[in-house]
Image (cartoon, helix red, strand yellow):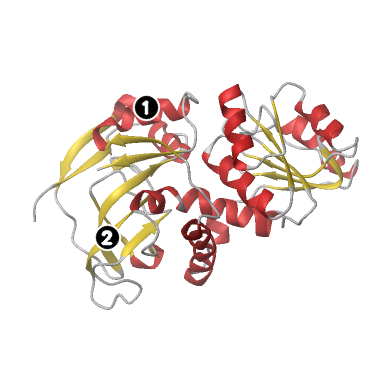
Amino acid sequence: MTTYRAIRVEQTGGPEVLRLAELEPAPLGPGQARVRIAAAGVNFIDIYHRDGSYPRKLPFTAGLEGAGTVVEVADGVTEVTVGDRVAWENLPGSYAAELVGEAAKLIPVPDDVSDLDAAAFPLQGLTVQYLTTSSYALRAGDDVLVHAGAGGVGQLLIQVASRLGARVVATASTPEKRQLCTDAGAADVIGYEGFDEVARDLTGGQGVHAVYDGVGKDTFDRSMNALRIRGSMVLFGAASGQPAPVDPRRLAAKSLFLTRPKLADHVLTRDELLMRAADVLGRIATGELALRIGGRYDLADAARAHEDLAGRRTTGKLLLIP
C-alpha cells in the first residue's frame, strides 16, 4: 500500500507545529474501517489539542471530524460496507488523506448531501441538534440569545431556532457578520457592548428564555443578566476562556437553570448518534438548513487554517481538503 499525507504534531505549541508528513497505512483492527477522506473539519478543539490545553499522547495526527468513502472494513463489521459515503465527529487522525477508525462512529451520508457539507456538519450540526432539543428544548414564541451568530454553530442555531418559531437575538462583532446573522433568520442583531440590557429592552424588560453561549468568560456574566425568571443558561463552549465559578445564589435570584453540556454525552449509543445525525442531514438535504463553508484549505495549509480560526478572521465552517 502507498503512503498517504497527514498533518502530524510531534510537540505541542503554535500553528507552526502542524507538519505535513507521509505515513504508512495502519492495519485494521477489530471493528474498524478504512476511509478515504474527502474533507476534514477544522475546530477549536483541534487548536486545544495542538497547543496542549487538552493533552493527547505525542506524536499524533491532528483532527477529529471529516467525511469520505469507506475503502476497507475489518472482518465482522456490519455498520458500514466498502463504497459507503460516511461522516464522523470524533475519530482522531482526521487531518489526513485516509483514516482508520471505529466503524460504529461512522455516519451514513445521503446521496443528496455533498462531501463538503458532510464534512462540515457533524460536530456543529450535532451540537446544535442536542442544544435545541435536549439542553433547552426550543418552542415557538421563545426569545433566545445566540452569541457569535456568524460562526458555524451560531449560523445553524439561528436557522434552527427561527424555523421552530423562536425569536432570535444574535450577537456579532462587525457589520458584515451582523448581516450574516440577519440572513440566517435572526430577528435582531446586536453588538457585544451592553448586550444584556439591549436583550432585556428587546423583550419588554423580561429577558430571554434561553442563552446559547459558546464564548464563555467574556460573555457569561452578562448572559446570566439577560435571562428572564426561570430562564436557561446553556454554556456549550469557552472560546474566550472559562468563566469564573458560579455561586448557586445567583441562580436562586431568578430561579435560573445552568447547564454545561458536551456532545459526547448526547451520542452515547450508535442509535442516538444516528437519530441526531438523521435529523440534521435530513434538514440539509431538503435545504431547510444551509451550511456556510467559510474557507477551504489544502491539507498542507492546516497551520493557516488554525491561525484564521483563532484570529476570528472567518465565518462559518473551515475545511481541509487532502
Q: Quadrant of residue 190?
A: top right
Mark 2 or mark 1: whose residue is earlier in sequence: 1
Q: Position of residue 313 (x, y in %)?
A: 47, 24
The residue positioned 47% from the left and 41% from the top of the image is 292
The N terminus lies in quadrant:
bottom left
The residue positioned 52% from the left and 52% from the top of the image is 125
Instruction: Tell whether label 1 touches label 2 (CB within 8 Å).
Output: no
Q: Secondary structure at mark 2?
A: strand
Q: Nearer the viewer, residue 62 or 196?
A: 196
- Judge left or right: residue 149 versus residue 14: right
- Judge left or right: residue 171 versus residue 111: right
At label 2, which amino acid type do we have? Thr
The residue positioned 28% from the left and 42% from the top of the image is 321
- Judge left or right: residue 136 versus residue 51: right
Q: Residues within 10 Å of mark 2 (few under 14, many from 20)?
A: many
Q: Nearer the viewer, residue 63 or 82?
A: 82
Whole-Å distance between the Cαs marked 2 and 1? 32 Å
Instruction: Count all numbered tags in the image, as a single digit.
Output: 2
Q: Position of residue 188 (x, y in %)?
A: 73, 34
Q: Quadrant of residue 186?
A: top right
Q: Which residue is mark 1?
A: 13
The C terminus lies in quadrant:
top left
Q: Residues within 10 Å of mark 1 (few under 14, many from 20)?
A: some
Up-down: is 40 above or below 244?
below
Q: Position of residue 152 (x, y in %)?
A: 52, 40
Up-down: is 226 above or below 94?
above
Q: Which residue is mark 2?
A: 69
Up-down: is 100 above or below 198?
below
Q: Residue furthest left?
A: 1
Q: Secondary structure at mark 1?
A: loop
The residue positioned 49% from the left and 56% from the top of the image is 284
